[in-house]
Amino acid sequence: MFTGIIEEQGTVEKVVRQKNLAVLFIKADKVLKGTQNGDSISINGCCLTVTGQKGKVVSFDMMRETLDVTTLGELKPGSKVNLERAMKADGRFGGHFVTGHVDGTGVVKEIKKSANYVSFEVTAPQPLMRYLVAKGSVTIEGISLTVGQVKKNSFVVHLIPATLRITTFGRKKAGDRMNLETDILARYILR
């Protein structure tokens, strides 16, 4: 379980592709403190298990399902990723309940910028749209965000300057695909 509050951006060192699997190597700093093999780390919103560490580089196995459902299969050396360690039971809870189980991907439709303010309009698959409500929560690339507006096939989120600095949102442009996780509470309520 995660909160959607990004701790740092990591850098992809390499991706080793095998049949039905890819091993992802990420250079990081903050998220490695106290991290052991078997721990969970959210990478762009996808919960992955630490399989190895060497210095400041940590590795993760990505199975076929992860490569098919998320954008992680598109990563290459030099790519920046959002990182968050799993939530501690005795820690503060700052975002919303995030499982790290990506529901699908959306596409940046439009970015609007003004002074100290940016909004992103993101298209989403129709099955996910039913879980999105204005003032509800959504996770995009592992980031806990509040939905500002819901349209027929898209939704809008509004970002403060800190979000653009701390996360990979500052590098996104129209047409980019992003990992989406709808609010687990909304899914249970509708179910």
Image: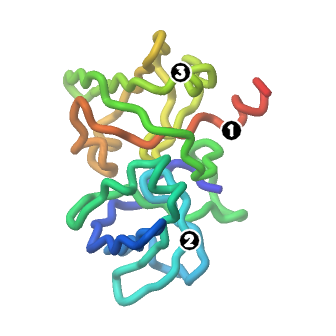
Task: Say which amino acid is labelled 2.
Answer: Thr
Q: Name, please, the residue furthest toward the top.
A: 152
Q: How far is the residue under mark 1 from the one under mark 2?
A: 21 Å
> Which label lies toward us, 2 or 3?
3
* Residue topped by disc 2: 49
Q: Residues within 10 Å of mark 2 (few under 14, many from 20)?
A: some
Q: From where the camera sits, is residue 105 visible? A: yes
Of the numbered discs 2 and 3, the one sitting upstream in the chain is 2
> Which label lies toward us, 1 or 2?
2
Image coords of residue 43 (percent x, y): 44, 59
Q: Secondary structure at mark 3?
A: helix
Q: From where the camera sits, is residue 28 visible? A: no
Q: How far is the residue under mark 2 from the one under mark 3?
A: 30 Å
Task: Say if mark 2 contacts mark 3, CB within 8 Å.
Answer: no
Instruction: Name the residue: 47% across, 73% down.
Output: 60
Instruction: Name the residue: 50% across, 56% down.
Output: 66
Q: Residues within 10 Å of mark 3 (few under 14, many from 20)?
A: few
Instruction: Name the residue: 50% across, 39% down.
Output: 104
Image coords of residue 129 (percent x, y): 55, 21
Instruction: Name the residue: 44% across, 43% down.
Output: 179
Image coords of residue 152 (percent x, y): 48, 10
* Residue topped by disc 1: 184
* Residue topped by disc 3: 126
Q: Secondary structure at mark 2?
A: strand
> Which label lies toward us, 3 or 1?
3
Q: Nearest the camera: 118 or 162?
A: 118
Image quadrant assignment for residue 90? bottom right
Task: Say which amino acid is labelled 3.
Answer: Gln
Of the numbered discs 1 and 2, the one sitting upstream in the chain is 2
